[in-house]
Image (tube, grey):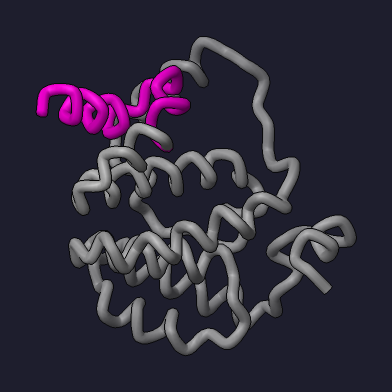
Amino acid sequence: MLIGEELHKKGYSEMFDKETTEYMDFCAFLIDRGQYEEAWMMLVNIKKESIPQLFNQAVCMVSAEAFTYALPFLERVLILLSSMQGGLKAPASPELEEIRNQQNELWAYHQPVSFRYVEMFPKILKESVLRMMVDCYLETGNYNKVIEIGTPLISKGYENVIEALEQIREE
C-alpha cells in the first residue's frame, strides 16, 4: 500500500508504531542539541522510510555543509509530501501574520521534524524543503535550480530565498 493510500485511512503519524515515533522524537532532540553525528547514526538504522527520517537526514547533511548529499533526501521528501493533504489551519489574523513574517526571516526551516509535525503542517514542511533546496543549490553553484525553485517563493517573503536570488543577480 502506498503512503498516499494509507493517509486516506489514517493520519500520517498513525502509520508508524509508537516506538518508531518516539525514536524519531529522540533523533529530533539530538539534532536540536547539535548532536548530528548521534542523530545520523540513529536515522540510518530506521528500517521503514519516512518523511521525518529523510528530512532530518537532510538537516544533518546541511549542518555538515554536505549540500550535495542533502539534496536527494529533500527531493524524496517532496515526492512523499505530494500525496499528503490537509494539515492544521488557523484563521487569518494580524497576530498570525506578524508571527509568520518574523519566522520567514529565521532559520526555523533547518530544524528537525517529528511525525506529528509532518501530519499537522505538511504545507509548511514543503516550503521548508524548498527553502533548504534553494540553500543547497546556491552553495553548489546550481543557480538555474535556485531561480527555478526560488522564484515562485518570492511572494512568501522568505529571507533566504530573497537573498539567494539577489546574490545571483549581482554575480
The number of numbered discs placed on residues in the rendered structure image is: 0
User: Does residue 99 show up?
Assistant: no
Image x and y of residue 136, in percent: 28, 51
> Which quadrant does the N terminus fall into?
bottom right
Furthest toward the top, the residue is 94
Does 89 sit left or right of 161 as displayed? Answer: right
Residue 35 seen in this snapshot: yes
Give coordinates of residue 77: x percent, y percent: 54, 59
Q: In this view, does 9 lie above or below 35?
A: above
Residue at image position (49%, 58%) is 75
Q: Where is residue 82 in the image (x, y as percent from the top left)?
A: 66, 50
> Residue 163 lies in magenta, yes or no?
yes
Relative placement, left or right, of 97 versus 110 is right
State whether residue 87 is above or below residue 67: above
- Residue 4 against residue 164 in the figure, above or below: below
Residue 4 or 43: which is nearer the viewer? 4
Residue farthest along the front direction in this orientation: 144
Q: Please give the name of the residue rendered at 74% of the width and 41% of the height, measured from the top-left corner.
A: 86
Q: In the rendered structure, which segment of residues is drawn in magenta?
A: 149-171
Q: Name the outermost residue toward the left.
A: 171
Which residue shows up at 53% across the image and 45% down it? Answer: 126
Of 147 and 9, nearer the camera is 147
Instruction: Indicate the quadrant containing the C terminus: top left, top right, bottom left or bottom right.
Output: top left
Q: Is the magenta stretch mostly helix, strand or loop?
A: helix
Quadrant in which residue 108 is drawn: top left
Would you place residue 94 above or below residue 66 in this image? above
Which of these two is toward me, 95 or 88? 88
**Left or right: 171 in relation to 76:** left
Q: Does the magenta stretch include residue 137?
A: no
Q: Which residue is drawn at 26% across and 46% down?
A: 142
86 or 65: which is nearer to us? 65
